[in-house]
Amino acid sequence: MCFVYFVVNSLSANKMLHAIIMAGGSGTRFWPKSRRDRPKQLLRLAGESTMLQQTVARVEHLVAPDRVVIVTGADQAAATRAQLPDLPVENVIAEPCPRDTAPCVGLAAGIVARKDPDGTMIVMPADHVIEPVEAFRATVRAAVAVIDDDPSALVTFGIRPTRPETGYGYIERGDRIETREGIPVYRVVQFREKPDRVTAERFLAAGNFVWNSGIFVWRARTILEAIRAHRPQLAEGLKPILHALGTPEEPDALAQHFPRLERIPIDKAVMEQAPNVKVLEVPYNWNDVGDWRSLADLLERDAAGNAIQGHVIARDTTDSIIISDDDGLIATLGVDDLVVVHSGKATLVARKDQLDKLKALVEGLGEAGYGSHL
């Protein structure tokens, strides 16, 4: 997955706060609406603006947008610039290839540390729906306060689970350390991979597990030190890139060395091993909008339980997701529990319980001679 992130100096509450907004990916779980050059965060899925634009708006009262650096995949850079026209063109840097979140975080931390050696970073994906916004901002302020008191801490945001979800990673929380802004702060016992159904039910019943939201707060220097301690090979690989930042050699260093970096998420590279990890149990509603089913939870339903967008006629149709992304009409008759999406000269028809296989289906389009639809 490639990432877009924003590095911003705060003009309000904390001059040392920077926001890193990760965005990217191939968009397979929202095919056919999403494609390689327009992944989920660049789409208007819920609301009048795109998910990327909503994420930027979410942090605008915490950090100022005047010092924004964007790192994205080469095939998404132009679309990203178009969605955020106020950003300087030279502030958009394209990753030469996908390397997952640990290399991205290391690169972002290097940029922040170069500009602000004591800078604090909030790292977040660009494709989540979070409401209410002020509760999110209060959580960020609480996390920054934790870091100000303990600069060696790595802080993450946990979501109280509402169901035995098997599609999310979990965090086991330990003792309650303190409360900030009315938000409890716990010691992290361990990170857990996506569980099977029985394990997820056990986590839910235990009451001391939260979903891993993928949102983190830490000092830039602290996360760089943690990468050196727990993933020295990655730290070594980042060295020539970070050394070249802000120089004419930066593009060549990125192109030459970034593809060689280990492809690994920051959770595995650092968070699962670091000794001083804390989790805030957040007070806001959160949806990672992982696939069409998650999106349906954000849309209004008709009397038959259908989530509908665009030109749709649904007769004797129940509990379905039907989306027409252009001027075309979709008409359904006598169907139940389906996903029907038409966008960009491609149509998906699937049972909702088969959506976990959509990624494999999309990845096979090229081999089947339909690469132009990716």
Image (spheres, rainbow, N blue to C red):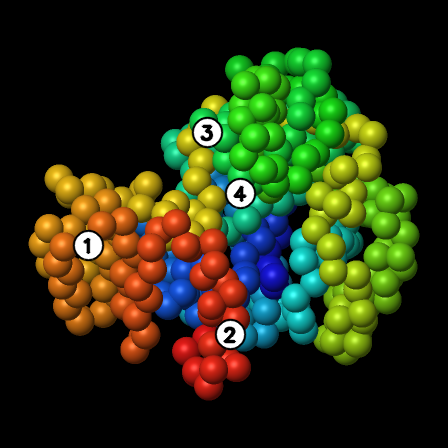
Question: At x 67% / y 58%, what residue is drawn?
Answer: 100
What type is the residue that disc 1 sits on? Val
Question: At x 75% / y 71%, what residue is drawn?
Answer: 259
Q: To which quarter of the image does residue 192 belong?
A: top right
- Which residue is labeled 1 in the image? 335
| Front in this rendered view, residue 300 or 119 | 300
Note whether 117 is above or below 371 in the view shown.
above
Q: How much space separates mark 2 and mark 1, taking CA atoms? A: 27 Å
Q: How much space separates mark 2 and mark 3, taking CA atoms? A: 32 Å
- Which comes sooner in the sequence, label 1 or label 4? 4
- Asked if residue 153 can be seen in this view, the reply is yes
Q: Position of residue 59 (x, y in %)?
A: 49, 42
- Which residue is labeled 3 in the image? 163
Q: How much space separates mark 1 and mark 4, taking CA atoms? A: 27 Å
- Which comes sooner in the sequence, label 2 or label 3? 3
Q: Position of residue 356 (x, y in %)?
A: 47, 54
| Front in this rendered view, residue 233 or 171 | 171
- Which residue is labeled 2 in the image? 364
Q: Nearer the viewer, mark 2 or mark 1?
A: 1
Q: Which mark is drawn over residue 167?
A: 4
Could you classify mark 3 by the number of other residues whose Cα lies within 10 Å: few (under 14), some (14-19), or many (20 or more)? Answer: few
| Front in this rendered view, residue 14 or 125 | 125
